[in-house]
Structure formats: C-alpha cells, structure tokens
Amino acid sequence: MRKEEMREYFFRVKELEKISHAYIIEEESGQEADALAGDFAALLECEKGTGCGTCHSCLAYASGNHPDIIRVSHEKPDSIGVEEIRRQLVDDITIRPYSSPYKVYLVPEAEKLTVQAQNALLKTLEEPPYYGMIFLLTSNAGKLLPTILSRSVLLKLTEEEREELLLPEEDRNLFLSLLRQAGQLTVAQMADSVKTLKERKIPAGAAAALARVYLRDVLVLQSTGKRELLRMPEELDGYQEWAGEVSSHALHQILEEIDAMESRILSNVNYELAVELLLLTMKTTKKLGEHSGVVQEDF
Ligand SMILES: [Zn+2]
C-alpha cells in the first residue's frame, strides 16, 4: 500500500480498536516507514486521541523525547545483537509505560537482527504486555524468522507512483509549458501545440498523469497553502497563478475532463481532438475564473 493508504489504515485500526501488538513494515527503498510508525505511535499516545499535535504527549513526540515511544538503536552497523534487543526492548517492555496508554518500540533496520536477537524477541511477541507495541521496520521481511512473521502483521509500503516521470525530459517540459499557458493560448496556438504533441508521440496516459499531478498540486496549494505537500514544487510559480485564478470547483471539473480525455483516447477517438478538448476546457475554465470569479457548469 502507499503512504497515505497506510496512514488511513492505521487510523481505521485505531477507530475499530483492532490494534495489533506487532507490525512489520517492509519498505524496499525510501525512509517513510519510520515516520509512519512514529506518527501512529503518537496518535495512540495522544491525550485527545486525535494526534492533535498540541497536547503534552504530542509535543513530547515532536521533540523526539517521548518517554513511551522508544527507538531501538544498535552499535555495529551491520547487526543488531541479542544483548541490544534484551536491554532496550525485551527487558524494558516489562516496565509499565511512564505516562501513556502504550509503550511503543520502533526497531529500524530489523533485517539486521541476528537469529539470536530474533529468538529473544519471540517470547515478547508471543506474550506481549497489554500496553506493548512493536514496529519492526525493514527493507527485507524475508530476513525475519517465520516465527516472527507469523506473530506480526506484515504491511508493505510501496513507493508513490510518478508516472509523469516516464515522459522523456523534453516532452515533459513541452507538456508542462502547455499546462502553464493553457489560459493564454489562442485556439490556433493550441492546435499547433497539440499537433506537436502528436508528432512527438507523447503517450496519452503519461500526459494525463502529468496533467493530474499538476492540477492536484494546484488544489493542494489552494486548500492547504503547504508547499511541502507539492509533488512538483519546481512548478510553484505556475501553480500560484492557477490557484489565484481558478476555483477549486473548476479544478475538479478539469480533473474530470482529464479522465474523459483518457477514455476518449483509449476508445480510439482522435488523439488530437481529445487533447484539444482538454486544453480548451482548461482555457475556458481559467478565463471564467479570471473575469467573473463565478464558475459556470456548462460551456
Ligand atoms: Zn495530542
């Protein structure tokens, strides 16, 4: 599952009170698992039960000093030994939480646990205290013993898809400049651009994906103002222009038009026509926003 899906999953697990004592999060590359597990721990410990970010517990987590959210460390770069696991987890977990409902342990690089360390952990996984929770974070769950795997919930974190990157650089830039200028192009210029797109054989799926990412970014910027959530922050200037001129309702309409464009192309409607229709929608919608601030349902 992807990052946002896993976040959602943890929220649901908490809501339904189906929290397991042990999770393995496998993530081949990237470093999202640690933050996801930490955020889930913070949500469980939060005094308001919402991950509010402002209570005593949430602030302690944010500062990296939560007494009941414990990150297991190891000295040797290539292995986590049995003594390290005993001292930091197996023995420590028998002591009740300091100030929170749970005591949560994060074990990064769990594939480096030696067989003895895993066996030491097994007893705790078999009979965890009611307040105990363990996250094994790993790039390869296959390195863990079957007995460990069978006593944990295994979750696989996949990378965000970035289909738009499938376009060669030059095509990508060409299409992006079209998106930026969609409001200003004359119909003749638009027809020219669409012809170029077709000549360069830009695949419709990749173009649609890129347009979607672009417009979602505009929506995100409009609704949250948070630049760190953008998937293509380098496009900020163009986004700000779009966000200032077009309502979120209109943006949703354009997104629907992108879906329609894709299915038109899949059903073998003329490629030029499909892309032109899309750009025309964007142009019209943007112009509407510019002049009246009112969104019209049909054009
Ligand atoms: Zn809180």
Image: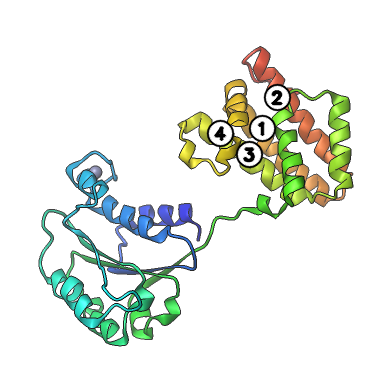
The amino acid beneath tag 1 is Gln
Pair 4/1: label in front: 4
Q: Which residue is mark 2?
A: 285
The answer for how far apart the CA atoms under marks 1 and 3 are is 14 Å
The CA span between labels 4 and 2 is 14 Å
Place of residue 228 in the rendered image (x, y in percent of width and height, measured from the top left) = 46, 40
Which callout, 2 or 3, points at the residue further toward the start of the chain?
3
Q: Position of residue 114 (x, y in %)?
A: 31, 83
First in sequence: mark 4 vs mark 2: 4
Q: Are marks 4 and 2 in contact (CB under 8 Å)?
A: no
The reply to whether callout 1 and callout 2 are in contact (CB within 8 Å) is yes
Q: What's the distance in space between the residues labelled 1 and 2, CA to CA?
A: 9 Å
Q: Secondary structure at mark 1?
A: helix
Say which mark, if any, is on residue 118: none
Q: Residue furthest front?
A: 76
At 69% across and 31% down in the image, what residue appears?
180
Residue 75, picture quadrant: bottom left
In the image, is 163 to the left or to the right of 279? left
Q: Which label sits in the foreground, 3 or 4?
A: 3
- CB of residue at label 3: within 8 Å of ligand 1? no
Tell me the residue that label 1 is attached to.
Answer: 253
Q: Helix, strand, or loop for circle 4? A: helix
